[in-house]
Image: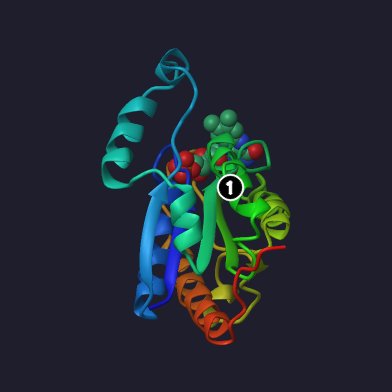
Amino acid sequence: MTKVLIAFYSRTGVTEQLASAIAEGARAEGAEVRLRRAREFVPAEVMAKAQGWKEQADAMNARYEAPTEADAEWADAIVFGGPTRFGAISAELKAYIDSLGGLWFQGKLNGKVGSAFGSSSTPHGGNESTLISLYNPMAHLGLIIVPLGYADPAMFKAGTPYGASSVSMNQAAPPSADDLEVARFQGRRIATVARALSAAHVTATKA
Ligand SMILES: Cc1cc2nc3c(=O)[nH]c(=O)nc-3n(C[C@H](O)[C@H](O)[C@H](O)COP(=O)(O)O)c2cc1C
């Protein structure tokens, strides 16, 4: 069975909904999915300054384990997602990526599928730059990056060629039906590509 890790950060639940739709798509292709939420590392007093931050984090943490090195080693495909932070990826997700240095050093992520998704507040607030900024660490980790292109009719209505996305208008708008359709397509696509790569034995190697 193809194994898919969806490692995401979400503070207010928008990216979480995209993650869930990607999981749905991957499962529809027969994949086993681990959904994992990266944890906050800021002090409690910083979280307390944003209304509802701690409560939403606690609720999501009850639903999802934190992503680990073992999850990344287990996976045939790793999908990273998170909200835009000043046009780039969130520190919480980056901290998880940075924790993969040991696996990177051993060449253990080489040949796995990598893909990205995310959410911004405004239409031109940095969704695409955030997804592209995720491509940089994926390339270093040795992942085979799988974008979406316009390879499905859903792509002509929503999303980006770089990965599923949504515009939350300061969390007022949940992902639309079209956004979720793109996310499900992403799940199907990465599961299909990961299955093909596994069959072709494009596996991790020690440098
Ligand atoms: C510190 C910070 C920086 C942000 N930077 C941007 C930004 O550059 N562009 C944007 O459109 N939204 C920005 N946002 C908003 C979030 O990316 C957006 O609300 C997103 O939909 C939240 O997703 P989530 O519910 O998964 O946390 C920022 C939010 C915070 C807290």
Which residue is drawn at the image coordinates 54% and 62% (left, top)? 164
Residue 189 at x, y = what percent? Answer: 52, 77
Which residue is drawn at the image coordinates 43% and 60% (left, top)? 176
Q: Foreground residue, 116 or 149?
A: 116
Q: Is residue 169 visible?
A: no
Image side of residue 15 versus residue 136, left or right: left
Residue labelled with disc 1: 100
> Where ligand 1 lies, by image quadrant?
top right
Which residue is drawn at the image coordinates 55% and 67% (left, top)? 158
Residue 153 at x, y = what percent? Answer: 54, 82
Q: Residue furthest front?
A: 206
Residue 36 at x, y = what percent? Answer: 40, 50
Q: Foreground residue, 19 or 1?
A: 1
Number of marks drawn: 1
Q: In the image, is the residue at mark 1 within 8 Å of ligand 1 by its beta carbon?
A: no
> Measured along the vertical axis of the image, is residue 129 above or below residue 51?
below
Does dot 1 land on a helix, a strand or a loop? loop
